[in-house]
Image (tube, rainbow, N blue to C red):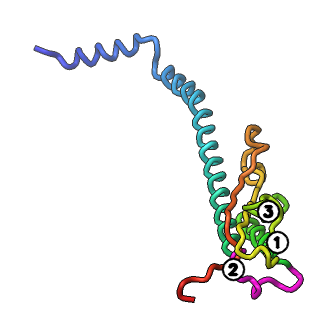
Amino acid sequence: MFNHRSKKSSFRQLAQGRRFSRSGRRGAAAVECALVLPIAVLMFLGVAELGQGLTASTTLTAAVREAGRLACMDFKDFVPAGMTPNQKIEQDVKRLLMASGVPQNAISVQIVHAEGNSLGQPFDLDHPSNYQKLFRLEVTVPYNQISSYPLRMLADRDITSSIVMRRGRVASMSD
């Protein structure tokens, strides 16, 4: 016949005779935690930084898209006196990005020709000869201005978004 009591006592004797006791297991857990926790924290911070960079990139893209749409419209009604359309577009982009937490002095806005011999040259939205011409609106923000953690490998990087649009509107078939 099998005696349960003798089996329990043999396990107890075995556990007491082992080299590691419960306090030793707790020490092993502390060492494992000390090894794993820094790696887990670094991974968490990296994911948070990646998320912040993607959020900034998405915000930048939305600002460029809205500014491009505005630059294509007939803007006579919403450009204040004493301001050019280019200045208005730049001001609106900067205000939108500032509302998202980007410092104004870090934002670079360029409106340049996107075709022909003038490729890359400044594009005057108000000039009549530029009507129906393609232009590129490009906004750049240094990565270190939107970063929570100053990472050396990304310190000299920029987040840039651009769009190519046509100035003016094309008459539709029904006009």
Does the magenta run of residues contain 128?
no
Mark 3 vs mark 1, CA separation in Å: 11 Å
Q: Dot 3: what SS?
A: strand
Vertical side of 161 occupied by 129: above or below? below
Query: Left or right: 111 with respect to 170?
Result: right
- Camera-side residue of 160 and 102: 160
Q: Are marks 2 and 3 in contact (CB under 8 Å)?
A: no
In the picture of the structure, the residue carrying the numbered disc 1 is 124
Q: What residue would you read off at disc 2? A: 73
Query: Taking 143 as reference, is 105 above or below it?
Result: below
- Quick one: SS at disc 1? loop
First in residue order: circle 2 vs circle 3: 2
Residue drawn 19% across and 19% down? 4
Q: Is residue 49 above or below residue 58?
A: above
Query: Which of 65 and 51 lies nearest the eye of the viewer?
Result: 65
Regarding residue 107, the answer to whether it shows in the image is no
- Going 63% across and 59% down the picture, which residue do you hit? 58
Residue furthest to the left: 1
Which segment did they paint magenta?
Answer: 71-83
Mark 2 and mark 3: Cα distance apart in space: 18 Å
Label of residue 101 in the image: none
Q: Residue at x 41, y 12 (%)?
A: 18
Residue 75 x %, y %: 74, 82
